[in-house]
Image (cartoon, rainbow, N blue to C red):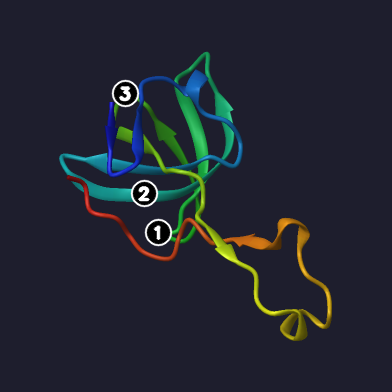
Amino acid sequence: MASNGRVVVESTDELASGDGIEAFRKDTLVHRGPVTDTMPECGLFWILDTVTGGRRLLDMSELSIFRLPSPTEEPALPDFLHGGRRPEGGTVATSYWRDATPLD
């Protein structure tokens, strides 16, 4: 199931280091950030939490977890703003963490 481009995560087997997630408790966003490590056998995983500002160990059984879509690709800045160097492909990834997204 998907919501606003996010995918419901049912188990830690579906997560990988670097995946952006949002964790909700009763429709309230409580944690948001990139996954740093997983323990699939225990249903636990760590994130670098941008809501609370620290590394957090989360339990799949206590929260509703959504994987965020990949960062949006934006056009690269003109060459003169890169010192004459343009990134490969001419685009740069934006951050997952610009804005909080509402749970719909």
The reply to whether dot 2 and dot 1 touch (C-beta < 8 Å) is: yes
* Residue 48 picture location, percent across and down: 53, 50
Which one is in front, 78 or 47?
78
| Quadrant, the C terminus | top left
Looking at the image, is mark 3 or mark 2 earlier in the sequence? 2
Q: Considering only vertical position in the picture, is 9 above or below 86?
A: above
Q: Which residue is labeled 3 in the image?
A: 61
Q: Amino acid at mark 1?
A: Thr
Q: CA distance from mark 2 to mark 1?
A: 7 Å
Q: Amino acid at mark 3?
A: Ser
* Residue 9 picture location, percent across and down: 38, 27
Q: Which residue is labeled 1 in the image?
A: 52
Q: CA distance from mark 3 to mark 2?
A: 15 Å
Q: Which mark is residue 31?
A: 2
Which one is in front, 58 or 21?
21
Which one is in front, 61 or 74?
74
Occupied quadrant, residue 4: top left
Q: Is residue 77 left or right of residue 103?
A: right
Q: CA distance from mark 3 to mark 1?
A: 20 Å
Residue at the spot 59% in from the left edge and 42% down from the top edge = 18
Query: Mark 3: which secondary structure?
Result: loop
Residue at the spot 36% in from the left edge and 64% down from the top edge = 99
Which one is in front, 52 or 95?
95
